[in-house]
Amino acid sequence: MTDTDRAVGDASGAGDALIEVDGVEKVFDVRRRAGFLRRERREVRAVDALSFTVPRGEMVGYIGPNGAGKSTTIKMLTGILTPSAGRLRVAGIDPSRERARLAHRIGVVFGQRTTLWWDLPLIDSYRLMRRMYRIPDARYEENLARCVELLELAELLEVPVRQLSLGQRMRGDIAAALLHDPEVLYLDEPTIGLDVVSKVKVRDFLRELNTERGTTVLLTTHDLTDIEQLCRRVMVIDHGRLVYDGSLDGLHELGGGERTLVVDLEHELPPLDVEFTGCARVVKVSGARQWLAFPAGRSAAPLVAAIAGRYPLADLSVREPDIESVIARMYAGGASVAP
């Protein structure tokens, strides 16, 4: 398979597309001072000739560097922004023309903003949303009970939102977005700033939501671990253009990056002998902790098994390369990208 095939040939078909994006552009007029009394106008193209489809029930990672156009895309898909050109459909609805109708079929979580009422207890926000979306009582109670159980919110329902930690509020926001049974869920940095435990809870919930209810999920994040654990398909946007659509392993192959296995030993040892693995090398040693680099396109499982069979382990973790470095290597290596 060629680089071009990987970059553009792995996209899912549009047989039962819930999200359709066809040649979409978004251009902003920006004015800035160019002198004491003069201002100059320039156009900023946030999204440029963007096309993709997302089938019903798929969970897709939508990633890219800061300023790449991810949030702008989400805002157009929800109807907050109107495209400058192109065609958008979500569940057969034009988001910008029928925003109110679409709102009943989508859920949105922005990691940096909350849809909850700041000074009210969490449960009061949910009651208000029941009225806003006109959710039938039985359906509301069922969905609330399920979210409270899976996201562990029982002890937080009477706590004012302003007193919640970031992780608690994020779980509360995700529950709020799902009370009306949306067909598609947009998540913009849902694990940003969360501790490890909160991230695991959010990921487990999203995985179960997608598996059991078939909710379509479009996930934007800088954390490639989110993508690795939740999504089979990943799309990369850079400077407003889609530069990759396929698997995470395929992306790493194009970028030629490395993952890092962090090994915590039971006691301090010299650098591990990993030549027998044929793919890893020790890059750093600090006391009983050692860092091993290995190709990003390879599974960590064989390496972990090999090391565990030879050395006394206390803990292991895998660190993904950041998306900015992956994309930079794609371009530096001359990898083909979508036109």
Image (cartoon, helix red, strand yellow):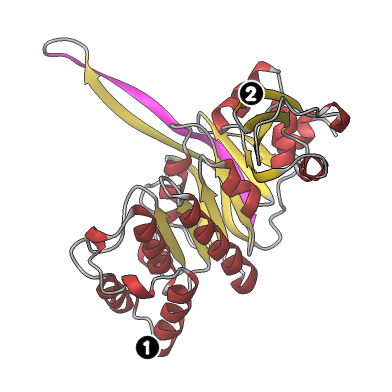
Q: Pick out the residue farthest to the top.
A: 35
Q: Pick out the residue farthest to the left.
A: 37
Query: Magenta stretch mostly in which secondary structure?
Result: strand
Q: Amino acid at mark 1?
A: Asp
Q: Position of residue 146 (x, y in %)?
A: 48, 78
Instruction: Establish if 169 lies above or below 287.
Output: below
Instruction: Establish if 206 lies above or below 36.
Output: below
Quarter location, residue 7: top right
Residue toward you, 12 or 201: 201
Q: Secondary structure at mark 2?
A: strand
Q: Position of residue 193 (x, y in %)?
A: 40, 45
Q: Which residue is mark 1?
A: 137
Q: Position of residue 53 (x, y in %)?
A: 63, 51
> What mark, if any, has residue 315 been given in the picture?
none
Q: Which residue is mark 2?
A: 284
* Discs 2/1, front: 2
Label 2 crowding class (10 Å Cα cut-off): few <14, some 14-19, many 20+?
few
Whether residue 133 sits left or right of residue 252 in the image: it is: left
Instruction: Establish if 321 lies above or below 31.
Output: below
Instruction: Establish if 158 lies above or below 236.
Output: below
- The magenta segment is 37-54
Residue toward you, 283 or 227: 283
